[in-house]
Image: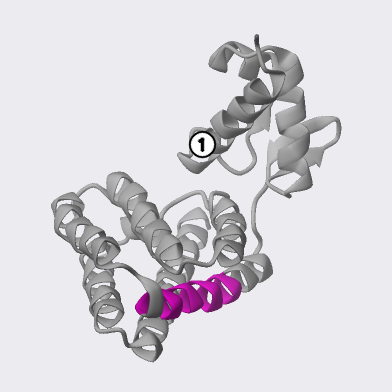
Amino acid sequence: MHDPRGTQKDAYALILEAIDSHTYKPGDRLVESELAERFGVSRTPIREALQRLETQSLLTRDGRSLIVASLDHTQLSELYVVRGELEGLAARLAARHAAPEEIKVLRDMLEDDRKLVGDPMALSRANRRFHKQIHLASHNRFLVRQLDLVHRSMALLATTSLAAEGRGAETLDEHTVIVEAIEAGDGDAAYTALRDHISEAFVTRLRLDAQAVEAAE
């Protein structure tokens, strides 16, 4: 028997992935009929998914239309502050609780991701997988849930900071320090390394935004 709840979940996941992959960028208008045709889903689950995304502040209203939300400077700053603290906590807990197999997965990711330095979008996807693995290695379901919410909001950033010149290689060097601290069981070092990593990403983001404003003038 067909389960409408499964369809609703699929519609939500499909739209969220489209926002995350920048198929739909901040300011883009989302239309029920167009989404239903694109994803091959009926309009009812699309409508319910849009309502859910609006509740989560990933979509906002422009008159009668729903558009992908954007983050102003204050919101961006607030997001990175929260992300830095929560990610740092995840790394601290991973240093205490990560199984040897989980650390091996992180090590393998580091090796594989070196091959992606010249492809910012591919590296961005790999970066999300890397961070997600640390979240899971914290073995704290409530923290993982909060980090999922934070990372959904990160989808509202129109570009990846990994597109900045040299940032890809720097990111992987920072990832290496994080994994070494987790592997050593040093929670304080893991927390500091990951929080500093997020801080560097924020600095890069601010530089990119400043350059975009200058180019537009």
Residue displayed at 24% across by 84% down: 184
Residue displayed at 68% across by 46% down: 58
Residue indicated by mark 1: 17
Q: On the picture, is 82 further left or further right than 132? A: right
The mark total stands at 1
Query: Can you name the residue that lies furthest to the right here?
Result: 63
Indicate the colouring scheme.
one colour
Q: Main secondary structure of the magenta part?
A: helix
Residue displayed at 50% across by 78% down: 89
Q: Is residue 200 visible?
A: no
Against 208, is 54 above or below? above
Against 131, is 43 above or below? above
Residue 89 within the segment the image draws in magenta: yes
Q: Is residue 148 visible?
A: yes
Asked which secondary structure carries label 1, the reply is helix
Q: Quadrant of residue 67?
A: top right
Question: How many other residues sit within 10 Å of disc 1, few (<14), some (14-19) or many (≥20)?
Answer: some
The range drawn in magenta is 80-95
**Screen quadrant of the N terminus:** top right
Residue displayed at 67% across by 31% down: 29
Q: Amino acid at mark 1?
A: Glu
The answer to which of 3 and 164 lies nearer the viewer is 3
Q: Quadrant of residue 154?
A: bottom right
Residue 71 within the segment the image draws in magenta: no
How far across and how far down the image is residue 6, in percent?
63, 24
Against 199, is 109 above or below? above
Q: On the picture, is 76 further left or further right than 22? A: right
How far across and how far down the image is residue 114, in percent?
15, 57
How far across and how far down the image is residue 53, in percent?
71, 40
Q: Quadrant of residue 36?
A: top right
